[in-house]
Image (cartoon, rainbow, N blue to C red):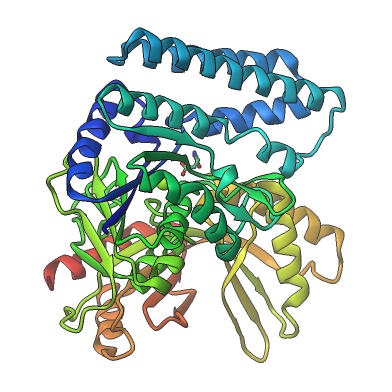
Amino acid sequence: MTTLVMKFGGSSVGTTTALSQVLSIVLYESEQWDRLILVVSALDGVTDALIEAAHLAQLGNQRGYRRIIANLRTRHLALIEELPLGTTERTALQADIDRLLFDLLDIYQTMAQTPADTVVPDKVDATIGVGERLAARIIAALLRQNDLRSVASDATNLIVTNDTFGNAMPDIRLTRDLVLNNLLPMLDRKIIPVVTGFIGVTAKGKPTTMGRGGSDLTASVLGVCAQADEVWIWTAVDGMMTADPREVPGAKVIPTLSYQEVAELAYFGARILHARMVTPLAQERIPLRVKNVYKPQQAGTLIHQANPNRSRNFKAVTSISGMGLVASRSGSLSPISLLVDQTLFATTHTHAEVMISSQSSTSSFVCFLIPTSAGPDAVHSAKQLLEEKLAENPESESWLVNPVSIITAISERLDEWPELTANVLQAIDKTRILGITHGPSHCTLSLIVEPQDAEDVLLLIHQLIINTE
Ligand code: ASP
Ligand code: MG
């Protein structure tokens, strides 16, 4: 019995062209595998809109959230209008869309009655999964219209998580039981479930979400719990790349990566995969593929166990923003780390991660990585608030805060081949290095540099990857 989990991201479900690709992929793969499980994200941009609507509801801005919901309704109705659906499917879908959005307005109204200045993450989580619910219903209808047995399935009946609202962690053991009871029977009846990505539920029944891009994690958890043979992530790019093609024009697709390499790549800023989705698959050794929905015949990137004949080179290089803090004194770093974490959480609802800390007899340096999920303005807004807080507190006043860039080169064989590190240092020549570290996974070399040097360093290291291929 072969089982495949396929996840389709927001850009592969947002237009009729993309949806017709999805349909032909599912029609084809349903012939190749005994059992298929699909996971879908909300249409592109819908989650952003829902987050904004939830914030407006919390501020009591009724006009604001109503306008957003009206736009979402128009967009989804227009999409199903364009799809080749029969009258029964279309009418049922229209009713579903209206019901889901009507219920949402109800929740917003309750939120708006007790306005609050700060975001309440559990309230936001109770509303923002609607985008996935809408998308799952649309895709299941499209498949049924094409003679596939398919049902939209809410992950609130499948994925149990802890109560870290906004960034919840799935509980594999509890989820496995639900998958056994609620999902596997459908597969046995040759039904293709279309599961809502991103969302889950606590053991006590409260809705949660698993962080931006969390549908990847849904796919990997379902893959593990249903003992899938493979998990495929369908995106609008050709696979995992040697660098972000928006920053490095010569970036190429990487044909194979190990679990460890791809996990580091996601952690250090490659935006294609959710950073926490790899571990469950690695533990069960389930291969993962990243493929382009518009070029299904291409292999994309295959992620599996390390291959003994690996090439003597870096696989990829990433760039991510961070904050560097310097003080001309030595001593405990815990108070400053705590302050930075609290500040970042207050401004962006994500936690800062200490990237590197180093001290000498007279000075200290701490560099924090700001997760890409925190958004593009995170460094700027966190720096501002942090400086205000430091000024309030004479004890910590001596810290200077500066934005930094963290450039990370990734190779599983870094610890075996010191010349890889030497090559990088030689390539970047006279660039000023603020900090340097070999990550504890023995798979990353990170250089901390001033933001104005980041582009050069990134290009130079990428050149090294391309030249020694
Ligand atoms: N729709 C959610 C987001 O935009 C989850 C996902 O796309 O995976 O973050
Ligand atoms: Mg994604």
Q: Quadrant of the C terminus?
A: bottom left
Specify the quadrant of the image occupied by residue 423: bottom left
Return the residue nearer the eye: 302 or 227: 227
Residue at figure coordinates x 27%, y 59% from the top left: 1
Left or right: where does residue 296 sit relative to residue 92?
left
Which percent across, then down, holds residue 289? 27, 57
> Is 325 on the left-hand or right-hand side of 19?
right
> Where residue 101 sits in the image (x, y, percent)?
60, 19
Q: Visible in this render: residue 159?
A: yes
Q: Is 310 or 127 nearer to us in this picture? A: 127
Vertical position of residue 187 compared to residue 366: above or below: above
Q: Is residue 58 left or right of residue 242?
A: right
Can you say whether 65 is above or below 266 in the image? above
Residue at 70% in and 63% down: 340
Name the residue rendered at 36%, 7% in the picture.
Answer: 87
From the top left corner, tell me how far across and down residue 6 is, in percent: 33, 47
In this view, the residue in front, 31 or 326, is 31
**Place of residue 208 in the rendered image (x, y in percent of width and height, measured from the top left):** 65, 46
Quarter location, residue 70: top right
Q: Name which quarter of the figure residue 421 lies in.
A: bottom left
Q: Is residue 377 visible?
A: no
Please give the name of the residue rendered at 18% of the width and 79% of the height, measured from the top-left corner: 310
- Label count reads 0
Front one among 109 and 428: 109
